[in-house]
Image: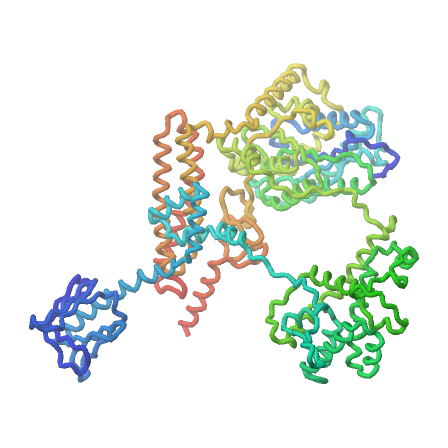
Amino acid sequence: MSPAPSKNYTDDVSLLVVTLDTNPFFWSDFPSHFSDFLSQVLAFLNSILLLGQLNQVVVIATGCNSCSYVYDSSSNKNHASTNGTMPALYSNLLHNLDEFIAKDKQLTTAHEPGNVPSSLLSGSLSKALCYIQRAFRSGPMHPQPRILCLQGSPDGPEQYVAIMNAIFSAQRSSVPVDSCYIASSNSSNSAFLQQASYITGGIYYKPPQLDGLFQYLSAVFATDLHSRAFLRLPKSLGVDFRASCFCHKKTIDTGYVCSVCLSIFCEHHDKCSTCSSVFGQAQSVAASTDNRKRKAE
Amino acid sequence: MSSAQQVVKRAKYKTTVKDPGTPGVLKLTREKFVFKPNDPTSKNKLEADFRLIKNHKHTKEGSNKPPWLNLAHSQGSYIFEFESFSDLHISRELVGSALSKHVEPSKVVSDEQLSASEMTLRIKLLQEDSKLQKLHKELVASGKLTESEFWATKKKLLDQDESRKLKQRIGFKNSLIFDTKPTSDGRINQVKFQLTPEIKYQIFTLKPAVHQAFRSFVPSKMSEVDFWNKYFRAEYLHSTKNAIAAAAEAAEDEDLAVFLKDDEILENEARKKIRLVDPTLDMEADQGDDYTHLPDHGIFRDGSKETSEAQNTLYRRTLLQDLNRQSEVVLEGKTLDTDMEHPKTVAEVLARRNQRFDGVIEEERRIRISKMTPIDDLQAQDDHAFAPLCIKDPRDYFDFQQANAVKPLDNSPAAKLKTRSNLGYEEAYGSLRESISNIKTMGLRDPLLSPDVAFKVLTGLTKNISSTKSNLGKSSQESVLDILPSATKEKLLDNWVCSQELLKHFWSSYPVTTQSLANKARRLKDAISQIYAKLEEIKVSSQSDLRHQVSLVVHPMQQALDAALLHYEADLGKRNAKGSKPNGYV
């Protein structure tokens, strides 16, 4: 990224970091095609760039083994392979995406057929935040950053801690995380994305009509942060605030909380696995084993 | 048996061991014992309460003594001689159980013995907070919790009130000790100074040089009395305002000179303070503008304007100096917590305190300088402000998640996917790459979306936005609880508070290590099951159209109670299963 102090950034210039779910297992089962989804997203990205000359778009692919930057509108390498049939944005992005998927495939390890790996949302959120931090440091005037998660695969509860950390760091840097959750069934929602958008003040939306995705994207997620103050955007109801336990990574309703470090567990432990605090009952158990030993002597 | 409520035995009552004894009938009940002599005219009638009995002793079977039971009270003891040892044993058992019964409740009372102020505080808190009062009535009056248990979790409330009436601390005395004027009776050539431990302490804090001198001279070089004699001699010389005489005396006695000279430590401190002044401010350059250092402008002690030779100024003190020093110490406002009887210890404590100070000051100066002289090139950019981590307000939190209460949460996203995932990863990745190459060759879908889809999306979005607006207004009418009639709502809220309190007590009584905790857990379990039943009742009695909503509200409460009940059963089972109870467990 070339810092351009001469550019006159105003408050409606956006830096949009998009995380794109490329979980092959999700897309292969999904009723609508990945190509349909991708063409709607590509059109949306193009329209963001068209909205303002200074707008910047970064795309991060979220695979199930890795994640990587696949497009950066401010990069100089972008004008490599334009063959005239397609804008540079599309051809570059598609080229990088293809490479990324090939790499991601090599990283795949054998998994049980019933067990679908979830996408590495935590990784791509962290990458997005890193990129945004660089933008913050590029100079006194920088574009207004926001993150848009285009996610379809279900949450991986094992990523709970990492994702929550990313969410809180986004909140602390005042970076809103918008989420567009793509799912075929009506009832399912992503608790992670709901919480991310709720905590960071972004928008969570689950488009009910997937063939109109472009319109949802441009109507709900295209507006810059400054203009959002004047618009009424969809609000999400029923945010799922449930947490994952640290021991088995299960999503739980009620559980045990470490009184020292607030780690969450689904069952009683003698010792906190995070901060090694010994919980009350453990002491008397220790005492009892001591006692038994003494009796045995 | 010991469970017998009453024992009647023939026995002899003896006032002392030597006393032959009065034959009669002894009647023991759980509350008291009555002795009736056979001879109705005898004065040795006895009726006493077990409450007055301190302890009991008895003679052993097989010893050569007759079967005696000795009940000791505060003034002496009652001795009964039974006809046989079996009679003695039966009586003894009853006495034992009667005594233990009387001991136990008295213990509980002592547990809850409260000072009157504590009691009034509790009453006041209850009066101020009607909800607390309700809870107190519900839980304590019905015996679900004892008074002390109830307040044990409310310690914060009690403490809060305690802190309100914090005592005011005593500061440093504001009287000028420099003015400890000598009293002279006028007849003989003698002056007297008054010296109290407090004055000594004041002297030490005000004059570090005296403090230092005290630490180095006493008791190695001179006695304490000598030290103070010298000190006041110097003070006296000061008070005569005769600088020349003072200088002469100082030349003769070097110890005295310590007191007469200006306080060197104070000067050092003053120099340090000058260094604390903003480094960009040049004091020396400004001194030219200052006229007070010129002769005749300094105000000398007690207003005298005596001017003498320059070399003697060393032995002169100004009132301004004194006043400044005094006010400085007063503002520091430190009092010693140790008693001031021993000047030696006072001196030690002061010395330690001053040491701690010096390092800090140097540090501060360095920080100040670095702040004053920023070098732009080396400064880190701190133009990006961080938002504080926030936990939003509870109402907001509730509004956002409450829709979940109405619809079931989908618990198993993974389970759902299990049924569909039937492709190997080769195929999955293959199809993904195929889609990409599709776009590469075909371009984007054209048209991107059909007009009727666009229209559907538009109406859908509009509807969604307008409906969430009406659903999620700031009006509290929308929460499930508010749909219910107010009576039901009140009842639910009361039960909620009550169950929360009970659960708090319940969980805090685990792990069960003593019998009293076990009792408490049992008591709380009963109370919890009562509340459970009450909730069930509310659920059933509510109107049919609201029953669903009520059950939604009640469900999480019952879940929490269920968890407690389950834990109780499991724990009880575990404890009973253990054959030999390990140490610490009951």
Q: Position of residue B43 (x, y in %)?
A: 12, 73
Residue at image position (40%, 24%) is B545
Q: Residue at x 14, y 72 (%)?
A: B87
- Residue B194 vs A188, above or below: the answer is below
x then y, percent, for residue B156: 50, 51
Q: Residue A80 location in percent, x, y?
A: 85, 33
Q: Residue at x 86, y 36 (%)?
A: A76
Out of A182 and B202, give the one closest to the viewer.
B202
**Image check: B279 left or right of B510?**
right
User: As rendered, which of B25 and B410 lies closer to the eye?
Assistant: B25
Could you tell me which quadrant the N terminus of chain A lies in? top right
Answer above or below: position of B164 versus B106: above
Left or right of B339: which side holds B77? left
Q: Is residue A105 visible?
A: no
Left or right of residue B404: residue B288: right
Q: Quadrant of residue B442?
A: top right
> Closest to the observer: B327 or A59?
B327
A228 or B114, which is in the foreground? B114
The quarter in which the C terminus of chain A is drawn is bottom left
Q: How many marks?
A: 0
